[in-house]
Image: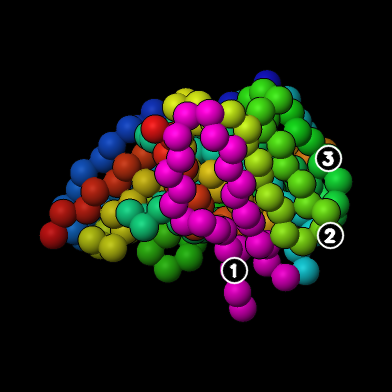
Amino acid sequence: GAGVSQTPSNKVTEKGKYVELRCDPISGHTALYWYRQSLGQGPEFLIYFQGTGAADDSGLPNDRFFAVRPEGSVSTLKIQRTERGDSAVYLCASSLRLSTDTQYFGPGTRLTVL
Amino acid sequence: AQKVTQAQTEISVVEKEDVTLDCVYETRDTTYYLFWYKQPPSGELVFLIRRNSFDEQNEISGRYSWNFQKSTSSFNFTITASQVVDSAVYFCALSGGATNKLIFGTGTLLAVQP
C-alpha cells in the first residue's frame, strides 16, 4: 500500500517568508509525528498528533512553528517568519495507534531558507 | 532524560566483511522500545527492527542480527557479509512514555567498498 507522502519534496524560500509543509500519513494511521533533521544529525521530535489533537508539541522550537491536523489525516506544518536556522529536512511519520506501534517515515521535505 | 549514543561516526569496510554498529541508551522508563532505521543516500528512513524492553532475545533476519543487553543498556546491530547496498546511515532510536516519540542517536555512516 501507499506509504507516508510529503509535499513539496524541496522548498526554497527567503528569510522572513511563511511556508507550509504537508504530510499525508498511511491510510488508517491515527498517530502522526513531525521531526526535523539537520545535516549530520539524527531526527529531532517536533510534535505528535493523536487524531486531530496535538498531544505533545514540546519539540516545537518556538512560536513561529505551528502544526494542524484538522480532519485527523493530513497534517500541515507551518513556519512563520522563516530564519536561516530553520533550514533542514522535515520528516513526517505515522503509526497505527499509539504507544506500541512502529513509526513509518515519509521521504521528507528539504527546506532551504536563503 | 532519554538519550541514545552512537559512538561510531563512520565505519568503512570491504564487501563481505562483518560489521557491528554500536548503540547505547539511557532511560528511566521501565517500558520502552528500541529501534534501528536505515537512511540510504535517497534520504528516506527505512524501518529495520523494533524491540521492547521486556524481550532480550537476540534476533536474526537474513544477514542482519541484533543483540539487546539491558545490563549494559546496549542494542547493537551486526551485518554479516556486508554488501555495497548496505551503505547508508544507520540510526538507533529509543521511545517511551506516553507519546512514544523517538529519540535518535546521531547515526553511523557505513560505507561498504566493493
**Chain where mark 3 sits:** A
Q: Give neighbour class at mark 1: few <14, some 14-19, many 20+ (Cα, 10 Å).
A: some
- Mark number, residue A3: 1
Outermost residue, left side: B114
Q: Residue at x 43, y 44 (%)?
A: A12
> Is residue A103 at all visible to an observer of this figure?
no
Q: Which mark is residue A71?
A: 2
Q: Which residues are magenta?
A: A1-27
Q: Position of residue A89 (x, y in %)?
A: 47, 43
Name the kind of residue labelled 1 in the image.
Answer: Gly
Nearest to N terminus: mark 3 or mark 1: 1
* Quarter that holds the N terminus of chain B: top right
Mark 3 vs mark 2: which is more N-terminal? Answer: 3
- Work out whether residue B65 or residue A53 is closer to the camera in this orientation and state it: A53
Number of residues whose C-alpha sits closer than 10 Å to that of mark 2, classed few (under 14), some (14–19) or many (20 or more): few
- Reply above or below: A28 against A19: below
Residue depicted at 13% across the width and 60% down the height: B114
Asked if one can make out residue A2 in the rendered structure from this viewpoint, the answer is yes
Can you give x and y, in whole percent of width and height, for residue A77 in the image?
66, 44
The residue under label 2 is which amino acid type?
Answer: Glu
Residue A46 part of the magenta segment: no
- Using the image, tell me which numbered label, if any, was put on residue B75: none
Marks 3 and 2, how far apart at CA: 15 Å
Marks 3 and 1: same chain? yes
Total numbered badges shown on the rendered structure: 3
Quarter assignment of residue A82: top right
Q: Residues within 10 Å of mark 3 (few under 14, many from 20)?
A: some
Q: CA distance from mark 1 to mark 2?
A: 19 Å
